[in-house]
Image: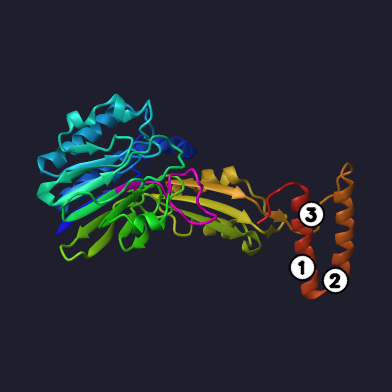
Amino acid sequence: MLKILHTADIHLGARFSGLGDRGAVQREQLRATFKKVIATALEERVGIVLIVGDLFDSNQQPQRNIDLVVEQFGLLNDNCIPVCVVPGTHDSLDSSSIYRKFDLEERCPNLTVFAGEEMSFVEYPELDLTVCGRPNLSNRSYSSPLKGLKSTTSSRFHVAMAHGSFYIPEKTADDDHVFTIEEVRDSGMDYLALGHWHRAYCCSEKPMAWYSGPPEWIPDQRDRGAVLLVTLMDTGEVTVEPREIGVRGCDEVEIDMSQAQDRAALEARICAGASGDLVRKVTLKGLRDAELMVDTEELEAELGQEFFHLSVVDRSHPKAGQVLEDAERLIRNRFIRLMNERIESAEGEERDIAENAFQYGIALLDGREVL
């Protein structure tokens, strides 16, 4: 039996510019969570740690992040736990690569960085394990990270590391280091450790192939951060246990303004489920009463203290009767007159439909996004 800790997309040094003054706080949280990744590996007594791309958010890093990585890998080394790293899209193995600037393998005797241009492998006889990996040479590529993958050793266990996108028709960009389900199935691996997608996701069960997602929240991530604890059994069975270790969470809330009776009701809806560790994006949509004025900056300032970070976007529109003609826009004015006539002549549900069509039509004519 072999136990593995699989993680990816740690993004040390990420700027978090969209968080304003909270960006620096979240950068420090990434460092703290990275320490928790290593602590989890020690607590679980894993045989090896796999970091599948984007350990760093870019190839330009402060010395303190390099020192942190060396320190934490040193803790693994003290406990005879090897670690494998494959360069990803943010820390790709290009001419300016951080893995070329700093010889991390020299400072960390238990570390293997896959730095060859083609698929290569390293054997761990004490674990009866072979790990295969191919670095990303740039942030975009039409070449599969599984190109050239095959089982070539007599080890009991074979594991591959790949940073790229699993091919989903009409959803996956062709230049996003794409690999296919056929490549996964033909790999001959016991387990494929994947990175690049920012959520835990299983794309194959035979052989088992998982994305771990980031261990701590970064933009475009929805789930709370986790690592994967992977167990390879001598019988061929593979189990994968997501272990949540991230501190921050994130959600998106849409509020239909036709259901908000007043400012107090709107504020209560925005703050429902609030937490000091939650990043929340609120979108206001639909038709609102004209007297219910919305100032997104004011809402963010007044309610932001309830969250780690709050952003509010207003895409709602005033109800019928609040839209005025514009002397310079003849098509818009004609539409207003025709729709007002239609509304006046309609009754019941037909009138409601006409009023909604009126508001959405005005929004479109004004070049606003309609939700």
- Which residue corresponds to mark 1? 353
Q: Nearer the viewer, mark 1 or mark 3?
A: 1
Circle 3: element type: loop
Cα separation between marks 2 and 3:
19 Å
Left or right of 94, for residue 133: left
Please determine whether, in this image, residue 88 is positioned above or below residue 239.
Answer: above
Q: x and y percent of residue 236 in the render?
A: 20, 64
Per the rendered image, the range of residues in magenta is 161-178
Q: Are marks 1 and 3 in contact (CB under 8 Å)?
A: no
- Which residue corresponds to mark 3? 322
Q: x and y percent of residue 294 in the render?
A: 64, 49
Where is the C terminus found, in terms of image quarters? bottom right
Instruction: Specify which label sits upstream in the sequence, 2 or 1.
Output: 2
Question: For residue 354, which quarter of the picture?
Answer: bottom right
The label shown at residue 296 is none
Please determine whether, in this image, residue 61 is positioned above or below residue 156.
Answer: above
* Depth order, front residue of 259/132: 132
The residue at the point 78 percent across, 50 percent down is 365
Disc 2 residue type?
A: Ala
Q: Is residue 73 visible?
A: yes
Circle 1: element type: helix
Disc 3 residue type?
A: Gln
The label shown at residue 346 is 2
